[in-house]
């Protein structure tokens, strides 16, 4: 169902009409075309199983496109992600991942997010294996949970995954046999190219130590 990703449901209660007749298929007009829930195989099956529920298919809410952000706002958004990354590094201090995290700087830069961009810090922590990576994620669950982050640990293809957010920045960590990948990103913004380049360069210099190894990912981020 590519054009729609939400459904509003209203139940018909005897004596209390909701505006949708029992079992009625309601059309949504978009761009002069009426889309009916009965015409969609998935929602048709829902209607068959729950005939007392009326369905209205709504187009996905896109929200208002934000106003272009300047260099200061882009720098502030990047700083939020850097602060989150430092919290992560502090939580992992003293673990098996600490030495590698400090030995190689993370990849940093702005990644496209629809028509906007989000500032991203990413690091692949190698040498832990899947078991060690799972332990790393458990450490983050404990530390970020104590700091008030909302946590969503789960598995994907049998491997541990952690998704977490404090409401402004978000972390995704995935353990694997080759590496445990940690990705932190900020809010999507309409930041001009020049501002993206300057803020990324500032963060790259900030996070790079005096003897930090280089990797191919750094070259990719160099293009911002």
Image (cartoon, rainbow, N blue to C red):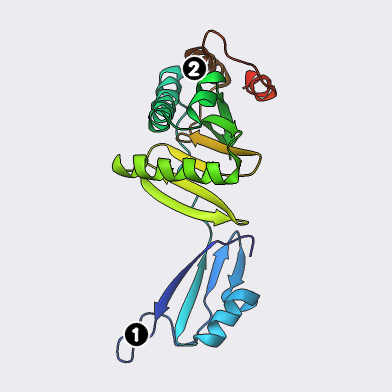
* Image quadrant occupied by the C terminus: top right
Decide if residue 19 is on the left or right side of residue 58.
left
Label tally: 2
Where is the N terminus found, in terms of image quarters?
bottom right
Q: Secondary structure at mark 1?
A: loop
Mark 1 touching mark 2, by CB under 8 A?
A: no
Residue closer to the observer: 158 or 222: 158
Q: Which residue in the protein does label 1 denote? A: 17
In this view, the residue farthest toward the top is: 210
Q: Position of residue 150 (x, y in %)?
A: 36, 48
x, y percentage for residue 102?
50, 21
* Viewer-proximal residue among 206 and 157: 157
- Mark positioned earlier in the residue sequence (1 or 2): 1
Residue drawn 57% across the image and 44% down it: 175
Q: Nearer the viewer, mark 1 or mark 2?
A: 2
Residue 203 or residue 64, whichever sits in front: 203
Is residue 166 in view from this perspective?
no
Residue behind mark 2: 207
Mark 2, Cα crowd under 10 Å, few <14 / some 14-19 / many 20+, is some
Question: At which x and y percent is residue 155?
Answer: 54, 55
Point 38% across, 26% down: residue: 83
Callout 2: SS: helix
């Amino acid at each position: 169902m590519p054009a729609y990703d939400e459904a509003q449901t209203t139940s018909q209660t005897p004596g209390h009409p909701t505006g949708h007749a029992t079992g009625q298929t309601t059309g949504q007009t978009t761009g002069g075309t009426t889309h009916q829930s009965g015409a969609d195989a998935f929602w048709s099956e829902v209607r068959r199983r729950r005939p007392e529920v009326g369905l209205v298919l709504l187009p996905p809410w896109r929200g208002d496109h934000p106003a272009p952000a300047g260099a200061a706002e882009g720098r502030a958004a990047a700083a939020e992600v850097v602060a989150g990354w430092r919290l992560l590094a502090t939580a992992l201090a003293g673990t098996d991942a600490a030495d590698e995290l400090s030995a190689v700087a993370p990849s940093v830069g702005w990644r496209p997010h629809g028509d906007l961009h989000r500032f991203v810090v990413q690091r692949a922590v190698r040498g832990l294996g899947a078991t060690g990576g799972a332990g790393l994620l458990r450490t983050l669950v404990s530390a970020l949970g104590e700091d008030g982050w909302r946590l969503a640990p789960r598995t994907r293809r049998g491997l541990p995954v952690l998704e977490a957010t404090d409401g402004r920045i978000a972390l995704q960590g995935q353990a694997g046999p080759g590496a445990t990948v940690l990705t932190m990103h900020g809010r999507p913004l309409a930041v001009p190219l020049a501002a993206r380049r300057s803020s990324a360069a500032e963060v790259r210099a900030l996070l790079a130590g005096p003897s930090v190894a280089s990797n191919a990912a750094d070259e990719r981020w160099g293009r911002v």
